[in-house]
Image: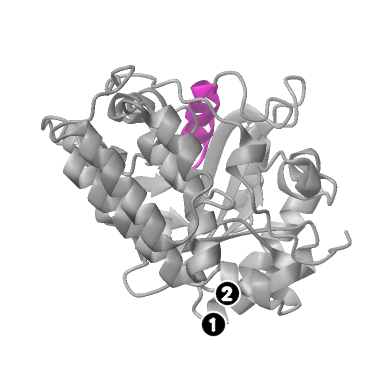
């Protein structure tokens, strides 16, 4: 797959997840074959103002490429400035403008999914950003604002016309948030109308779902978000599924090692106190469904210190024995895994990035 001048090793893509898709998590999913990662969503205003906390969210490292930096805002000039800073400092290989985030703090700024209601502003935003950078430029959109305001095709055509190199489509409306089901026919409609690559997103929770999305919509890439939480192996298994190979379940030993490595990466990135705190949500996701995990998660939620977490982790996995993890509900690798998701709890960090005015 190719996005502008950016060549990807495959078409499996990690979605931008605020507070989740940071450098440690991206490092882990790349280990299992993820072909492209998006950064956490960051404020264009914060980047343009040179705010240290905002720029720190975009911190990358060796091997963390290809990488798309996702920014949000509503001011065309500010977004263009932020894109230019990302390019000039080599913070990422491409820039994505978020036009799909439905959370209230973003919507109140006229950013994210609120832009779906302003096609003229979208035109100016993409035009100015395109003029400011040479690296690939993409946008991520939704079906529209509401069931009566579905305009993904209109927005996608504007983006392509103003020079965007790809469009990612999450086919839920802003009003839906993360509830209900995705309407993949929206992705199919956008793909049929555009010449640039289209990335499909929404309810891809298994290798079978990824294959079905490609087949039903003709999209070029598959974006995986919630299904990767505690399950980076979904990338490996999806690639194996595409190749006609069998699914390779993670053994308990492999799962324990990856959890420990993820913790080490988190502590290395943020320091011990913040690193352990940031990692805790991932620990809960990694162990979800394992025998006795409810008690373990309750106890682990109060543990501080890397050594203590590793000790508790080893003790817990010793009780499980060896081999393939025993799940309360076997994962259906050919269909929907029905992962429950509370956005307010899963996305604890949303970059405030200043107070951009429209």
Disc 1 is placed on an element classified as: loop
Q: Residue 86 carries which label?
A: 2
Q: Identify the residue at image location x=12%, y=30%.
A: 244
| Residue position for label 1 | 89
| Quadrant in which the C terminus appears | bottom right
Q: In this view, does 184 lie to the left or right of 6?
A: right
- Tell me the magenta residue range: 182-195
Main structural element of the magenta stretch: helix, strand or loop? helix
Mark 1 nearby-residue class (10 Å; few <14, some 14–19, many ≥20): few
Q: In this view, does 332 lie above or below 137?
A: above
Q: Identify the residue at image location x=31%, y=25%.
A: 291
Label 1 with label 2: CB-CB less than 8 Å: yes
* Percent x, y of residue 195: 46, 45
Q: In this view, does 171 lie to the left or right of 265?
A: right
Q: Is residue 218 above or below residue 21?
A: above
Task: Give the CA distance from mark 1 to mark 2.
Answer: 5 Å
């Amino acid at each position: 797959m190719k996005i502008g001048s950016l060549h990807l090793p495959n078409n499996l893509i990690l979605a931008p997840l605020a507070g989740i898709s940071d450098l440690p998590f991206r490092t882990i999913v790349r280990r299992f074959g993820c072909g492209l990662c998006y950064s956490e969503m960051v404020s264009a205003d914060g980047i343009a103002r040179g705010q240290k906390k905002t720029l720190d969210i975009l911190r990358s490292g060796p091997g963390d490429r290809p990488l798309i930096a996702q920014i949000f805002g509503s001011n065309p000039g500010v977004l263009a400035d932020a894109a230019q800073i990302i390019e000039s400092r080599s913070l990422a290989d491409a820039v994505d403008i978020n036009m799909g985030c439905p959370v209230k703090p973003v919507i109140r700024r006229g950013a994210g999914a609120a832009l779906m209601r302003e096609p003229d502003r979208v035109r100016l935003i993409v035009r100015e950003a395109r003029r400011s950078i040479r690296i690939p430029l993409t946008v991520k959109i939704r079906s529209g604002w509401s069931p009566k305001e579905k305009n993904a095709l209109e927005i996608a055509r504007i983006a392509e016309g103003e020079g965007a190199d790809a469009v990612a489509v999450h086919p839920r409306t802003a009003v839906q948030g993360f509830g209900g089901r995705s309407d993949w026919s929206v992705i199919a409609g956008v793909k049929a109308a555009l010449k640039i690559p289209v990335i499909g997103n929404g309810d891809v929770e298994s290798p079978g779902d990824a294959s079905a999305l490609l087949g039903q919509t003709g999209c070029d890439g598959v974006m995986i978000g919630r299904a990767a939480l505690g399950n980076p192996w979904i990338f490996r298994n999806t690639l194996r599924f595409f190749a006609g190979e069998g699914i390779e379940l993670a053994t308990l030993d492999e799962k324990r090692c990856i959890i420990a490595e993820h913790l080490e990466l988190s502590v290395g990135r943020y320091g011990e106190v913040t690193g352990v705190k940031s990692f805790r949500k991932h620990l809960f996701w990694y162990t979800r469904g394992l025998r006795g995990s409810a008690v373990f998660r309750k106890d682990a939620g109060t543990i501080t210190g890397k050594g203590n977490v590793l000790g508790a982790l080893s003790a817990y996995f010793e009780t499980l024995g060896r081999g393939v993890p025993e799940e309360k509900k076997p994962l259906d690798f050919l269909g929907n895994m029905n992962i429950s998701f509370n956005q307010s709890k899963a996305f604890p960090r949303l970059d405030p990035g200043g107070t951009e005015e429209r």
